[in-house]
């Protein structure tokens, strides 16, 4: 048996299958059951249809894969309930709110979402409640089963030596890079000029001369919403995702109203409320970033030059300098380290901005760069010190250079083995029923060995 460590998204996919279809593509029928937990034929086939529509690559026999995924989840949920694991009401509500907000952003508004779904947002949340609860219980149970699994250096070496040498991955050069960033502030005269510009656009919208979304497409400096007319979906409680000043200003507005000019860490804005339902709202905004002059940039260079001198002298550690001076929230709380797409601190050149790539070209390991002006992804001008902590050469995977990656894979495999043994010992203890339509699936063979096969 090869039980898969299934992604949580698989169970979510089944719970949402066919949500955008008022009419299901197949008739309902129970095709599998674990204990009192049932799996519907319509859920399986609608999930495959949804995967097809979204362009997701389908595995061979996707219906079999989805049935197996749900058998695994149902067994984990049964054991979680037996072990008295619970999902907090607040945690579940937050997950449901996030899912609905994702749909609202996808379809553009709550009204469009409800029209497509043929249900109110409240009804959608109630439909998702039990599948979400089951997914979270299954995740908790899976974690409980493997929580005490550890890996030793001897096991890591044995795992590595079991891999055929011609199957070892090849790595491009990887770097560990940290930075201390300052964003110079524009002077008051320039900020006042930009503020007057925004106020003029506010006047044009309020007098009907211009549409807010047209002005946003023309003038906003927010690349995340510019092409969408400056539109975002918000929730009042998402304070970790949104600037608090932005949130506060948005929820003071009535539908159609335009805010005064507000200042956030990103720049100056005006906002317009599109629609609101309780703590959820759809707003548009125009962002303008007051430009900084060479004089402000030079002041930041001088400040960071003093910091660099302390780093070189050893009177200040890099971590302390990041905490005290850095203004980049993306790296401030990771000790200034740049992170790869997979969350690790080892990045490849293609994951760095062009200014940093150029700066690193001639740097040596453990060296600090001079304070360097740059522009971030939002086109804000900043100044930073770069610290190159390590640089690997392109190489075939080996224990010396890639121990942490190999150890992580070895640990995953050991956890996988523990999960498989757990299922082997527990499957015979459950009442299992599988419809004849899926009884021949190779993926559910071991379930069938202990199941009642139904027609």
Image (tube, rainbow, N blue to C red):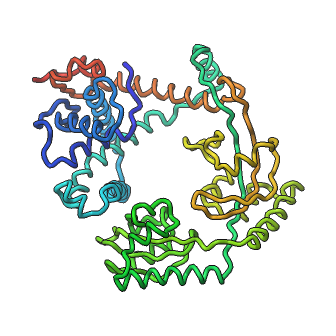
User: Where residue 194 sits: x, y (%)?
Assistant: 57, 79
Taking the spot 30% from the left edge, 57% from the top edge, the residue there is 107
Taking the spot 64% from the left edge, 61% from the top edge, the residue there is 328
User: Where residue 91 sits: x, y (%)?
Assistant: 38, 56
User: Where residue 331 sits: x, y (%)?
Assistant: 64, 55
Task: Report the residue that reaches farthest toward the right.
Answer: 313
Label count reads 0
Q: Quadrant of the C terminus?
A: top left
Q: Is residue 226 left or right of residue 381?
A: left
Rendering quarter of residue 350:
top right
Q: Is residue 206 left or right of residue 167?
A: left
Q: Nearer the viewer, residue 228 or 88?
A: 228
Q: Nearer the viewer, residue 201 or 376?
A: 201
User: Where residue 40 sits: x, y (%)?
Assistant: 18, 36
Taking the spot 80% from the left edge, 41% from the top edge, the residue there is 365
Q: Is residue 172 left or right of residue 445?
A: right
Q: Quadrant of the N terminus?
A: top left
Examine the rendered structure and indicate whether residue 114 appears above or below residue 416: below
Examine the rendered structure and indicate whether residue 309 appears above or below residue 39: below
Q: Is residue 233 left or right of residue 378?
A: left
Examine the rendered structure and indicate whether residue 366 appears above or below residue 215: above
């Amino acid at each position: 048996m090869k039980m898969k460590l299934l992604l949580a998204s698989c169970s979510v996919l089944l719970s949402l299958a066919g949500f955008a279809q008022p009419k299901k593509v197949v008739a309902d029928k129970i095709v599998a059951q674990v204990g009192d937990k049932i799996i519907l034929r319509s859920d399986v086939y609608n999930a495959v249809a949804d995967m097809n529509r979204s362009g997701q690559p389908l595995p061979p026999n996707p219906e079999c894969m989805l049935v197996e995924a749900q058998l695994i989840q149902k067994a984990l949920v049964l054991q979680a309930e037996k072990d008295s694991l619970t999902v907090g009401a607040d945690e579940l509500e937050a997950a449901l709110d996030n899912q609905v907000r994702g749909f609202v952003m996808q379809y553009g508004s709550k009204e469009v979402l409800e029209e497509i779904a043929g249900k109110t947002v409240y009804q959608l949340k109630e439909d998702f409640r039990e599948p979400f609860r089951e997914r979270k219980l299954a995740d908790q149970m899976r974690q409980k089963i493997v929580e005490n699994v550890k890996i030793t250096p001897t096991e890591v070496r044995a795992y590595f030596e079991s891999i055929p040498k011609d199957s070892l991955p090849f790595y491009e050069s990887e770097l560990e890079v940290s930075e201390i960033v300052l964003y110079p502030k524009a002077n008051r005269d320039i900020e006042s000029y930009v503020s007057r510009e925004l106020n003029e656009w506010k006047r044009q919208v309020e007098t009907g001369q211009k549409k807010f979304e047209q002005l946003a497409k023309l003038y906003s400096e927010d690349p995340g919403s510019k092409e969408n007319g400056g539109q975002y979906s918000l929730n009042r409680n998402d304070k970790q995702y949104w600037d608090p000043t932005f949130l506060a200003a948005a929820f003071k507005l009535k539908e159609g109203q335009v805010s005064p000019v507000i200042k956030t860490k990103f720049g100056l804005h005006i906002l317009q409320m599109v629609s609101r339902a309780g703590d959820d709202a759809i707003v548009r905004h125009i962002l303008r970033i007051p430009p900084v002059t060479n004089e402000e940039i030079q002041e930041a260079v001088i400040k960071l030059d003093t910091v660099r001198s302390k780093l070189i002298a050893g009177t200040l550690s890099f971590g302390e300098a990041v905490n005290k001076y850095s203004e980049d929230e993306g790296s401030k709380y990771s000790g200034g380290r740049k992170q790869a797409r997979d969350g690790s601190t080892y990045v490849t050149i293609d994951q760095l901005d062009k200014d940093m790539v150029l700066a690193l070209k001639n740097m040596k390991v453990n060296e600090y760069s001079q304070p360097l002006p740059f522009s971030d992804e939002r086109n804000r001008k900043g100044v930073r010190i770069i610290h190159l902590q390590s640089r690997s050469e392109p190489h075939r995977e080996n224990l010396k250079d890639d121990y942490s990656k190999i150890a992580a894979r070895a640990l995953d495999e050991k956890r996988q083995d523990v999960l498989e043994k757990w299922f082997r010992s527990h499957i015979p203890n459950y009442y299992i029923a599988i419809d004849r339509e899926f009884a021949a699936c190779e993926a559910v063979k071991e379930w069938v060995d202990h199941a009642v096969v139904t027609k």
